[in-house]
Amino acid sequence: MNRTRASSVDAFGTRNQRNRIYPALEASDGSTLSLNFTQMSSLDSRFTFTRSNTSNIWTTATFINSRGLVQLADHNLVGNSAFVGSSVGTGWTPTAGGTFANSGIGSITASVTTSNQSWISRTFVTKPGIRYSASVNVTSIAGTLNYNQVFAVAGSISSDVFYRNGSVVTAGTTAQTGLLTIIFTAGAGGTNTFRAGVGASGTNQENVTVVFDSPRAVEGEITQPTYFVSPSGSEYQAPRFDYNPNTLAPRGLLIEGGTSNIVRYSETLEITGGFWGYNAATRTVESSDVNPTGGTGSISFAPSSDGSSRYAGVFLTGQTTASIYTYSVWLKGKGTTACVISIQSSAGGQNATMTILSQPAGANASITGNGTGFPRISNLSTTGWTKVQVVLSANLGGTGTLNVFMYPNDTSSQTTADSLYAWGAQLEVGVQASSYIPTGSSTVARTRDELTMANISALNFNQSGGTVFMRLEENPRDQNTNPYFGQFEVSPSGRGWAFARFNHSASAGRRMFPIAFSGPSATLISSSTVTRSVSGEYKFATTLEPSVARMTVVVSGGSPVVTTATAGTLTTIGALKFNNTSESAATDFSSVWLAEFKYWPSVLPNETLKTLTL
């Protein structure tokens, strides 16, 4: 995590590249959609991306940015920030005492002529102790009013700071036009109300008018945030363009299924509520240490006396254990450069495998003890963070105790000098770690990502036959499942042509194949075993002929497979969807990095398909 590399990343870790659709490629090869997601910072406007966040507490989606740092996905927790709908915007509540007028999408005019106040407000849930940023762009002010009167956050807050265009201003001073922001720390109340308007109780504001647009609220101390519109009643959640943490090479668009981090206090590792415990060990808050986000704050722990079985541990009881679990965490050497991580039931350490997911450039950590209950990593970097995962070899069955213990140095012969840094602990169902989910006093779920193109006529879609090319890398998180990823869906809704399906069963091995749907039943039309190309990537080209229910498949340079399905014809194709609910069971979604996607409104020859997948 201590690499440096020139990149087009602004002060907030957001790439400032423009989205590219490569019209030259489209013109030369006949494709009507040609997307390279590794060179994008935003999506093609023909796509709709969703990742719901029903709790509205904070965004639960993170990714690795181009500097190798953990970053929260861009978001706006204020729903309908464009004020679409009623005169003040659906979901917003007006306050009597002045006048409010919707001046058009993204703009509201508020005015008062007496000792009144005129607000619109929206309530959202906050996480105690988390810093939030609420902003409104004020385009004009007539009269005299101060920052407190332009907008306020009502609820339990412990502190606040005002900014104008990124510069700190004193609360109560005369407001000016520009991007006005309040940074506040949420208290224990759990909810806050974002207000935007003019006037304040007990203040005489005669003939004051303010025009403002697009309020937003996010967590994290950002003094001059980029604005993201949330056009509907729900908050905005941005897609994630992820990077390989080791090479810093762009991986493309990260699209994940949902999961939960059942480790509480994932960054502070605190003992509140008894979820973390320290056996003959001491926890130290390292407030000045640089953590994997590039910000400050982590935890170190060390034996409080010489001996054995000194550890920091997650304690869970009554946990459903009829699944395979994966534990992941960032570690950094301090007094020792070794750590044993053991996932345990009431019977003790369970067989597991540890893997290094990322480490600083030049680091050379190694692992011993895999396949036992106590895998150990040694030679950790002392200057940068190493992320590891530990995966159970089998599910434990039933319901019971599920603990994770981190032993500095080893399980025996430990000394008070054997200190370690730790940050970002996560325990989740599955055979591979997903993207990091920050938690506080409760477990936190991240919902699935879905990508949709509802209007495929924009592709010049050919109902008689077309060709799809995809390059992607899969994160094989699920076990004994058959998650589907991409498909052209039968119009108006329902199953259609799924051109990416992953089979993870032990009996069939790991493979990917296309499948044809007709109504509720599915007919497999190719079981060609997938070979991966470079570093876990899949490259495949598929021709779709709905009128005769035929699909031709070439995967990673293999021979084409032509099979005619018996499911009947699928003559009316509607939307293009990735990770959508009509593909499979509600819990059976793929997690992939989508690097490239192309579509031709014609059936390309088999030799061309083979060339595409080389």
Image (cartoon, rainbow, N blue to C red):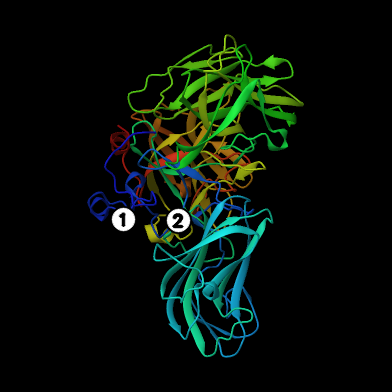
Judging by the rendered image, the residue that carries numbered circle 2 is: 222
Mark 1, secondary structure of its residue: loop
Is residue 95 positioned above or below 314 on the image?
below
Is residue 539 positioned above or below 34 on the image?
above
Judging by the rendered image, the residue that carries numbered circle 1 is: 18
Residue 301 visible in the snapshot? yes
In the foreground, 463 or 234: 234
> Residue at image x 26%, y 55%?
23
Quarter the C terminus occupies: top left
Residue type highlighted by circle 1: Arg
Where residue 607 appears, as percent x and y from the top left, is 29, 35
Mark 2, secondary structure of its residue: loop
**On the image, which quarter does residue 352 sit in?**
top right
> Is 296 on the left-hand or right-hand side of 281?
left
Classed neighbour count for the residue bearing mark 2: other residues with Cα under 10 Å, few (<14), some (14–19), many (≥20): some
Residue type highlighted by circle 2: Ile
In the foreground, 141 or 443: 141
> Is 391 on the left-hand or right-hand side of 318?
left
